[in-house]
Amino acid sequence: MLSWLIAHPSALTDEELGHQLALLMSAGTEPEQNLIVNALRLLLADERFASSLSGGRLAVEDALDEVLWKDPPMDNYAIHYPVRDVEVDGVLFPQGMPVVISFAAANTDPAHAVEQRAGNRAHLAWSAGPHTCPAQGHARLIATVAVERLLDRLPDVELAVPDGALARRPGPFHRALAALPVRFPPASAASAASAASAGSAGTAAQGVPGSGPANRTETGARRGAGAGAEQDPAGSGQEGSAARAAALRNRALRRAWTALGQWWRGGE
């Protein structure tokens, strides 16, 4: 990203590069991370969502709407400067004095509170006007895919501590958890033994990005090849080579997903 900015036709100065990088980190990478974590915390801690998860119905979109209303990734950010002295509810805002607007406070204003938040996106989590977030559609997509992928891979994940014990990271702008400790059951010994006997190539394709239906079909084919290798010792060397090749492909795929995620977080 830095190289792309340096080579940009606008010929940004060092100071402008610094401002752009600070903006990308503070308004791009950090909020996306907080949106994902806050949504996951809500899904695991709130009974309304926990029950739907246990029933096999993912309510990720509804959880994202709830988070953006009540637990937005950025509490405060839109700093304004009054062009003249302004008094609001008996409080004087002098001309030129920076005023920090709280998105979270605006969203939870009792005068505009509603019971049903699902599907309601009339919040200010993305700001508004000419400075509204230009990548909110991308941000929702990234958060949805991240949470759904994690819950698909770890369906029994749960909070390792009570929700009330989770600590927030202090800061004037971001609403972020210091940590989100979770636990999930390890693979059973029987399952591990079955996977091992089916062939190490089959296990290599599990638990990595991109292991969707196509990969599961390929895994099944490898398991069949592994069964054949057990009957034919001469094929064990080929099976080992296939396992190593599969592991290399999976590592490359994981790196590609990581790079794609970094590119999205960094902006277009």
Image (cartoon, grey):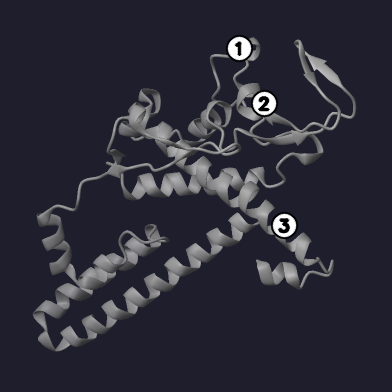
Q: Residue 186's spot in the image, x, y percent?
A: 19, 51
Q: Label 3 amino acid?
A: Gln
Amino acid type, label 1: Pro
Quadrant in which residue 70 is drawn? top right
Kindly state the secondary structure of the residue where label 2 is placed. loop
Callout 2: few (<14), some (14-19), or many (20+) C-alpha neighbours within 10 Å? few
Between 68 and 237, the one nearer to me in the picture:
68
Residue type for callout 2: Ala
Identified at 32% across, 31% down, the residue is 55
**Label 1, residues with CA under 10 Å away: few <14, some 14-19, many ≥20:** few
In the image, is residue 208 above or below residue 120?
below
Q: Looking at this view, is 87 or 137 the one in front? A: 87
CB-based contact (under 8 Å), mark 1 and mark 3: no
Choose between 242 and 21: the one closer to the eye. Answer: 21
**Left or right side of 12 for 30:** left
Residue at x 70% of width, y 42% of height: 133
Residue depth check, mark 2 versus mark 1: number of the one nearer the observer: 1
* Mark 1 / mark 3, whichever is N-terminal: 3
The quarter of the picture where residue 177 lies is top left
Considering the numbered disc 3 on the image, is that residue within a helix, a strand or a loop? helix
Q: Which residue is identified by label 2?
A: 122
Q: Say which residue label 3 marks.
A: 20
The image quadrant of residue 123 is: top right
Q: Which structural element holds mark 1? A: helix
Q: Locate residue 239 relative to residue 12 in the image: left or right.
A: left
Task: List the single residue furthest toward the right.
Answer: 84
Q: Which residue does the image show at 31% across and 47% down from the upper left? A: 154
N-term mark: 2 or 1 = 1
Q: Which label number is shown at residue 110?
A: 1
Residue 88: image x %, image y %? 78, 15
Q: CA distance from mark 2 to mark 1?
A: 15 Å
